[in-house]
Amino acid sequence: MISESITYLRNSDEVVKTVLIGGLLSILSFLLVPAFVVSGYFVRVLQRTMNGDDEPPVFADWEGLLVDGLKAFAIAVVYGLVPAIVGFVLVGGGVMAAFSGDAGSVIGGTSIFVGVLLSILLGLAAWYVIPAATANFAETGRLSDGFDLGALRPVLLSRTYATGWLLALGVIVLGVVVAGVLNVVPFLGTLVGVFVSFYAAVAAYYIIGHTWADLRTVEPRPEGTANERPAA
């Protein structure tokens, strides 16, 4: 599936335009709105691939992309807050305890170690859950389904999803490596690396979409209807 994911965008007649727009929006992601639009595009990739449509979407219906991107971003933030809060409480408490005396320094050091370890583990867990949660939202168009742990649990525990997630992660890592190599060339290499990272992210979502199709029975529906359904 990796080879198919890497050639996925090339199936589009507008591959150059799509990559250029996606890369430019990624460069401008510090403005937030472009980042939301890119996230919305990833949702479109999920919607198409989980329905067996391997024709890549284009950047159109900008309002719809923005709305779906905001919802996908909200899902990622909520799951990402868990490790952040745990780390803040344990590490922050450990630092305070470390300055309270000899006994406190031992407790504080232990708390910091445990906090960092738990944050890393929970962060990995969040990375594992977020694609499935986003796919569940993309399938139904309801934001609340991104947090439907009852529906997500069997998916997350399945070998099919674990395999698909690892393959998608592999594509992302490959993109990071290529982008890192390009960074050797000052400025221009970094700039091109952003476009490579966008391309790799699309390929990763292609894998997640097809993995979701293998796991779930998805009724085909018009693209972008996620915005026309209730948000909860």
Image (cartoon, helix red, strand yellow):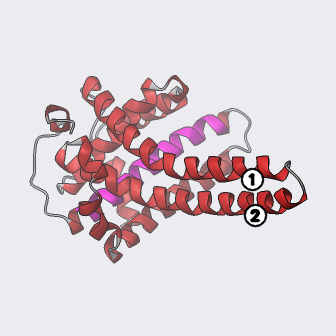
Q: Main secondary structure of the magenta part?
A: helix
Image coords of residue 45 (percent x, y): 29, 46
Residue located at (48% from left, 34% from top): 23
Q: How much space separates mark 2 and mark 1, taking CA atoms?
A: 7 Å
Element type at mark 1: helix
Q: Indicate yes or no whether the magenta region holds residue 191.
A: yes
Q: Which quarter of the figure is the N terminus placed in?
A: bottom left
Task: Assess whether mark 1 and mark 2 are in contact (beta carbons under 8 angstroms).
Answer: yes
Residue located at (58% from left, 52% from top): 86
Image coords of residue 83 (percent x, y): 55, 53
Tag 1: amino acid: Gly
Q: Quadrant of residue 121?
A: bottom right
Pick the front one: 47 or 130? 130
Which residue matches tag 2? Answer: 110
Q: Which residues are magenta?
A: 190-212
Element type at mark 2: helix
Using residue 83 as the reference point, say whether residue 147 is left or right of it: left
Q: Indicate yes or no whether the magenta region holds residue 211.
A: yes
Which residue matches tag 1? Answer: 94
Q: Is residue 12 visible?
A: no
